[in-house]
Image (tube, helix red, strand yellow):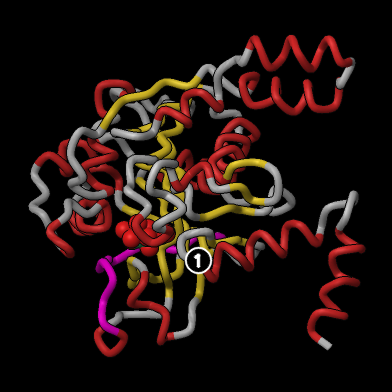
Amino acid sequence: MSMLRKTVRKAVIPAAGLGTRFLPATKAMPKEMLPVVDAPAIQYVVEEAVSANLTDILMITGRSKRALEDHFDGAPALERTLELKGDQTRLDAVQYSSGLGPIHYVRQGEPKGLGHAVLCARQHVGDEPFAVLLGDDLIDERDELLTTMMRVQAETGGSVIALIEVEPSQISAYGCADVVSVEGENYVRVNSLVEKPDANEAPSNLAIIGRYVLHPSVFEVLENTEPGRGGEIQLTDALQTLATADGVGGGVYGVVFRGRRYDTGDKLSYLKAVITLASDRAEFGEDLKNWMKGFLA
Ligand code: G1P
């Protein structure tokens, strides 16, 4: 057997969710388009993939997601207007998002869960390891995660998940991993996984966050994964199969992330993410912080 391992080139971004947590804001607009300061949340995620050199991007979308395609496409009339006005700054901002592409799209068709969304990428991805980035998690560009995970994937030949330590009371909002350390390595081996366990049944306080680098054998497993929690086909359940399957898919490993992560998955976390990122902006960060001091007093 060849020792040559395929490098990760493709990123899959599931974006087919209905965004019910943000209703009514998401009645006619994809939740991925909610602005985080001045760019839609999804743009940060695409940017992260591109900076990790994943230039082949597949977005899993669905009904009412057209704004996503428009955002990453050229906008000739708008660009022409800005050009005529000589507004180079805004023209650059508009052209930036279409310059990140090309982006491929496939529609999920039915809301059958994250595992099913990833399975929709099968034909595009083929037989090579690939990354999955969930739009609800934003990773600070100053911190390293995806490239570390890609390195661990290359080293182990398996699948790699991203983990954070959470308060035990928070674990039921996440997939949870039981792990063992690997001597001399900066990653852990995953023994088992469970999707959103009750706090008193969780095997650890290690929560799965929205970055994965997966072995292509996950597709075959997903095909055979029955609906799990919430009646949905769970990616966590497929990874549990890979973690316990002897040899198939090379096992599952975890990278424990200790950097800055901004959750935009529910209203309160989203507001915190916007304020945190806005406070870092050179244009108005200081003004915002000064205003907040007065507001809180
Ligand atoms: C999904 C996964 C879950 C993971 C989470 C991270 O859940 O199923 O295992 O912990 O993403 O954001 P969701 O938040 O889509 O319900």
Q: Amino acid at mark 1?
A: Lys
Q: Residue 179 appears at what percent x and percent y?
A: 37, 70
Question: Ligand 1 falls in which quarter?
Answer: bottom left
| Image height of 21 relative to 239, above or below | below
| Image height of 124 relative to 161, above or below | above
Label count reads 1
Q: Quadrant of residue 46?
A: top right
| Image height of 28 relative to 144, above or below | above
Q: Nearer the viewer, residue 271 or 86?
A: 86
Q: Nearer the viewer, residue 24 or 205?
A: 24
Q: Quadrant of residue 42?
A: top right
| Residue displayed at 60% across by 30% down | 50
Q: Which quadrant is home to the C terminus? A: bottom right
Q: Nearer the viewer, residue 170 or 96?
A: 96
Q: Residue 122 appears at what percent x and percent y?
A: 25, 28
Q: Which span is picked out in magenta? A: 186-198
Whether the magenta-drawn stretch holds residue 170 is answered as no
For residue 135, side relative to residue 174 (left or right): right
